[in-house]
Amino acid sequence: MEDSFKHIFLIGMMGSGKSSVGMTLSQKLNLPHIDTDEDLMDILNLDMNQIFETFNEERFHALESTYFIEHIKNNKYIYSTGGGIILNSQNRSTMNKFGKTILLKSSISNLYNRLKQDTKNIRPLFKKNNTKKNLQKIWNDREKYYTECADYIIKVDNKSINEISNEIIKKLN
Ligand code: S3P
């Protein structure tokens, strides 16, 4: 894999598979992996719903951004980012400057099915309104940021984590 860039950033909607793909890529490329949501939950010792209740959505994203901008100063990492990381313009320019950004793009129906099934990690934005309509609205509001940020767009519907990871590695080569 060419070494001219520093980090690999996985972006996309909640439920698009960023965490699983990040872990698989980490094994395949022998690079360390960071899941920004997991890290923030560990640091704060709260689950994501408690974080949203304690800080609210806007303050969570501010915290996420501070953590992210600081963390990327480290060695080369694969980042599985939170779905809202692209909302902040500094995060977007940082990703463009310091790595390759990959958008995992899923249909709304698949996101909906995945999020409904994931009872261990109930996303606050889905808990508040667990409808396809809500997911569609979030996507519509964010699509321009996701696509503006992405060096590569990978369609993930009906593909295994392994297939998606191999496709990413091919793009990066
Ligand atoms: C969010 C997505 C979540 C998490 C938080 C907010 C969002 O991450 O950061 O619930 O604004 O889309 P995942 O995309 O990893 O679920």
Image: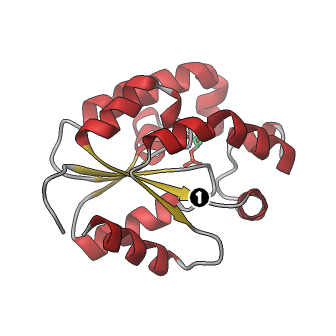
Is residue 144 left or right of 98 when viewed as pictured?
right
Q: Is residue 131 visible?
A: no
Judging depth in this view, the residue of 64 and 155 nearest the camera is 155
Count residues near mark 1 (Cα–Cα under 10 Å), then give few for <14, some for 14-19, many for 20+: some
- Image quadrant in which the C terminus is located: bottom left
Tell me the residue that label 1 is attached to: 105
> x, y (%) of residue 117?
75, 65
Q: Quadrant of residue 22?
A: bottom left
Amino acid type of the residue that numbered disc 1 sits on in the rendered structure: Lys
At x 50% / y 75%, what residue is drawn? 161
Q: Quadrant of residue 141?
A: top right
Is residue 75 left or right of 18 when viewed as pictured?
left
Q: Quadrant of residue 168?
A: bottom left
> x, y (%) of residue 3?
13, 59
- Image quadrant in which the N terminus is located: bottom left
> x, y (%) of residue 10?
43, 53
Q: Is residue 67 visible?
A: yes
Check the image and report above or below for 77 versus 67.
below
Is residue 84 left or right of 141 when viewed as pictured?
left
At x 35% / y 30%, what residue is drawn? 93
Q: Quadrant of ligand 1?
A: top right
Check the image and report above or below for 121 versus 160.
above
Q: How is the image coloured?
A: secondary structure
At x 45% / y 46%, what residue is drawn? 81
Question: Across the whole image, how many numbered discs are drawn on residues?
Answer: 1
Q: Is mark 1 within 8 Å of ligand 1?
A: no
Q: Secondary structure at mark 1?
A: strand
